[in-house]
Each structure stands twice: as C-alpha cells, then as structure tokens.
Amino acid sequence: KVPTIDKAIVENGADVDVNDAAINDVVSYKIEVVKQAGAKNYTVIDTLSSGLTYNNDAKISLHDSEPATITPNIAGNVLTFDINGEDTILDGQIITITYTATVNKGAVIDGANENKAVLKYGNDANKLFSTEESKVNTYVWAFDILKHNSSNAPLANAKFELYTGYNTQTKAYTGKIE
C-alpha cells in the first residue's frame, strides 16, 4: 500500500471540494495523509492560486490529538510541510494539516481559484515518490447592478448596500452608481 492524500475545503463543518467566496473571505482547508508501512520522508506540497493568501495559521494533528502549530516553508504561493517523526506514527493513522487562506484581489473572477496538494515520500530522500494531486476550487463571481425607477430608467447617483445573506446585518459592499 502507498500513503494517500486528500485535500478539502471545510465549510460549515463539512468537507467539500468546491465553494463560493468573495474577496476578503477566509477559506478553511484540511489535508489528510494516511500513513502506510515503510514510507518515510513525508512532505506535503500545497500550491495556492494567486487569488489566495496563506494566513500563517497551520496546525498538524494525529487522529484526534490536540493540534500543534506547524510552520511550512513558503516560496511564493507554495507551502511545503515537512512531517517529522513519521516513524512513530502507526500504519493507517491519519495525519491532518489545517490552515486558512484569504481570497485576495488577484482571485480569478467567474472561474476556479485552485488549491492543490501532493504528498512526496520514500525511503531514500533523494528518490521520492509522489501521490496524485488532490485539488479543491474556490469560485468568486461577478455580477452587475442596475438600480432603476418604476419606469425602468436607470437612476443616476443611486446608492446601494449589499449584504452577505438574507435577513443579515453584515454588509458585503456599499457603493454608488455614477
């Protein structure tokens, strides 16, 4: 058996492969690695799209243990997590890495903002194997606003407020139509 990796977005307590977000929203991610016999030198390489900014808050845990802080090596939008001590982890146990990223102004609008992870492993640090990539996507959508009068004529200098949901007080955007 070979180790496996699974990447997910955590939204409302559920693991999903796709979600919708807005600029400045925070997205929670979870990576699960299943350890297998004989595999060593575990390294998770996580690549965020340019529309996602890592929030420097990664945690690692084994099964249901208390999460501990883990600091990845960061090169641009690539996070590299070296998992130390895998010799003490039993075969079949799950290593979990969690972190958040903020959707930034570089996000792809009306398309996928991909986040992918791959596990590299092997007994010889100079000859590592790789799992298949595990990918998730965050979508950011654009829309047009037209404020008009009862005759359907556009209103000049119309002001408006958008909220994050129905019957909520959280403003998503305040603007003015010129």
Image (tube, rainbow, N blue to C red):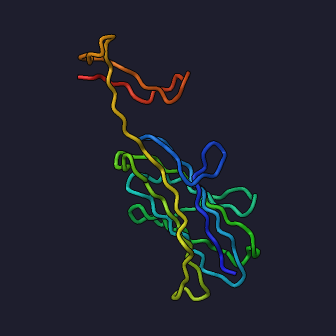
| Residue visible at 60% across and 57% down in the picture | 30
Question: Which residue is located at x 43 percent, y 52 percent?
Answer: 53
Q: Name which quarter of the figure residue 4 lies in.
A: bottom right
Quadrant of the rendered image containing residue 44: bottom right
**Residue 118 at what x, y percent from top left?**
53, 70
Closest to the observer, 130 or 53: 130
Residue 135 screen position, x and y as percent: 52, 62
Q: Nearer the viewer, residue 67 or 137?
A: 137
x and y percentages locating residue 51 in the rendered image: 39, 51
- 84 horizontally vs 176: left or right: right
Q: Among all residues in the image, which is located at the extreme front?
A: 151
Please tell me in which quadrant of the rendered image residue 84 appears: bottom right
In the rendered image, the vertical position of residue 31 relative to residue 10, given as above or below: below
Which quarter of the rendered picture does the C terminus lie within? top left
Residue 16: x, y in percent?
Answer: 60, 52
Count all numbered tags in the image, as a single digit.
0
Q: Quadrant of the N terminus?
A: bottom right
Name the foreground residue: 116 vs 66.
116
Task: Examine the rendered structure and indicate whether residue 50 appears above or below residue 75.
Answer: above
